[in-house]
Image (cartoon, rainbow, N blue to C red):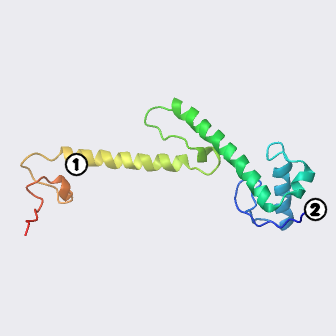
């Protein structure tokens, strides 16, 4: 039987990167994920015979399957969202995304765009040009032209 020393990576269930808790707790979590039908579904004997590298390879395959599921869930929900709503991502279903923060950022962008449109609408031909208007928006008469030497 091969020995096992765990030096892997990750933060999802069954992940070998988790460092919280005691070593015994970490091994218990690895064993639980490895032998659970909702994890890798390995027999206890097969689990203990795996090297950390083999375990990580199996876990990566399983996580890829879970991410594909999360992507399909996001797609299904996004098809039914109202127009203009912040879409869901696979990360939202994996506990890693923050749709609420993305929605707030999107709303801030919409408010800023509305303010800029309002400011641009107030500019009349031949009228005063706001000082904070970017040079590219001022028109050809106010943009300095470099002369060829």
Left or right: residue 59 versus residue 78 is: right
**Residue 103 in view (yes/no):** yes
Which is more toward the observer, 76 or 132?
76
Helix, strand or loop at label 1? It is helix
Determine whether label 1 and label 2 are within 8 Å by CB. no
Q: Quick one: label 1 or label 2, which is nearer the N terminus?
A: 2
Give the residue furthest to the front: 1
Q: From the viewer's perspective, is residue 83 above or below residue 111? A: above
Residue displayed at 6% across by 49% down: 126
Mark 1 or 2: in front is 2
Distance of mark 1 from mark 2, alpha carbons? Answer: 74 Å
Residue displayed at 25% across by 45% down: 117
Residue displayed at 79% across by 56% down: 55
Residue 114 picture quarter = top left
Which is more toward the observer, 34 or 50?
50
Residue 67 picture quarter = top right
Give the residue furthest to the bottom: 149
Rendered image: mark on residue 1: 2
Q: Where is residue 119 shown, x and y percent of the image?
A: 22, 48
Within 10 angstroms of label 2, few (less than 14), some, or many (20 or more) residues? few
Q: Where is residue 52 shown, x and y percent of the image?
A: 80, 61
Q: Where is residue 74 shown, x and y percent of the image?
A: 58, 38
Within 10 angstroms of label 1, few (less than 14), some, or many (20 or more) residues? few
Rendered image: mark on residue 119: 1
Left or right: residue 50 versus residue 130 is: right
């Amino acid at each position: 039987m091969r020995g096992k020393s765990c030096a892997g990576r990750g933060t999802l269930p069954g992940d070998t990167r988790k460092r919280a808790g005691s070593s015994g707790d970490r091994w218990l979590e690895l064993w639980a994920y490895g032998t659970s039908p909702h994890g890798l579904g390995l027999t206890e004997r097969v689990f203990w015979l795996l090297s950390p590298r083999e375990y990580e390879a199996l876990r990566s395959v399983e996580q890829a399957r879970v991410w594909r599921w999360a992507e399909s869930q996001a797609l299904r929900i996004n098809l039914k969202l109202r127009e203009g709503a912040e879409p869901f991502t696979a990360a939202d279903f994996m506990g890693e995304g923050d749709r609420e923060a993305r929605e707030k950022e999107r709303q801030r962008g919409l408010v800023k765009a509305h303010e800029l449109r309002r400011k641009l609408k107030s500019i009349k031909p031949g009228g005063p040009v706001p000082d904070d208007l970017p040079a590219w928006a001022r028109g050809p008469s106010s943009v300095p032209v470099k002369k060829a030497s």
